[in-house]
Image (cartoon, rainbow, N blue to C red):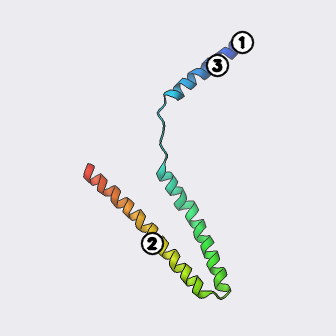
Amino acid sequence: MIATELAAQVAAAMQHGATLAAAEPKGINTEGVVTFFASNIAPILLAVLGIIFIGRASRGEISKVLTSSAIAIVGLAFIAGAATLFFVGDYLIDLIFS
C-alpha cells in the first residue's frame, strides 16, 4: 500500500518535472524593477538627503547645503532627461517599425 502510493507520487513528480523542463525561460521584468526603484528606493534616498541637508543647515553650513542641493537638483535633472530619452527612443522605434 505504501509502495504504491510512493510510486504514484514519484510518477506525478516526474511528470511535473517534465512539464517544467519543457517550459520556456522567462525574461526579467525590467519595467517592474524600474517601477520598484522609482516608487520605493528614490523617495527613501531623497528623504535621507533632506535629513542631511537639514542637519547641515542647523549647524550653520548654509553654503554647503546650497551646493549639495544644487548638485542633487542637477542629478535629478539628468535622471529625468535620461528617462525622457528612453521614452522618446521607444516612441521612435515604434514609429519606424510599425
Work out how far the residue at label 3 is from the one at label 1, CA to CA, in angstroms. 10 Å
Residue 98 in view (yes/no): no
Closer to the chain start, of discs 2 and 3, is: 3
Residue at 39%, 60% in the rendered image: 86
The part of the image, by quadrant, that contains residue 13 is top right
Which label's residue is closer to the chain start, 1 or 2? 1
Residue position marked by numbered label 2 in the rendering: 77
Q: In this orientation, does residue 41 appear?
A: yes
Residue 77 spot, x, y in % from top left? 45, 72
Mark 1 touching mark 2, by CB under 8 A?
Answer: no
Q: Is residue 89 left or right of residue 34?
A: left
Question: Tag 2: residue type?
Answer: Ala
Q: Which residue is mark 1?
A: 3
**Can you give x and y, in whole percent of width and height, for residue 87 in the image?**
37, 59
Residue 29 locus on image (x, y percent): 49, 48
In the foreground, 78 or 94? 78
Label 3–label 1 contact, CB within 8 A: no
C-alpha separation, residue under disc 2 versus residue under disc 3: 58 Å
**Disc assigned to residue 10:** 3
Of the two numbered discs 1 and 2 in the rendering, the one whose residue sits closer to the viewer: 2
| Lower sequence index among marks 3 and 1 | 1
- Secondary structure of the residue carrying tag 1 is helix
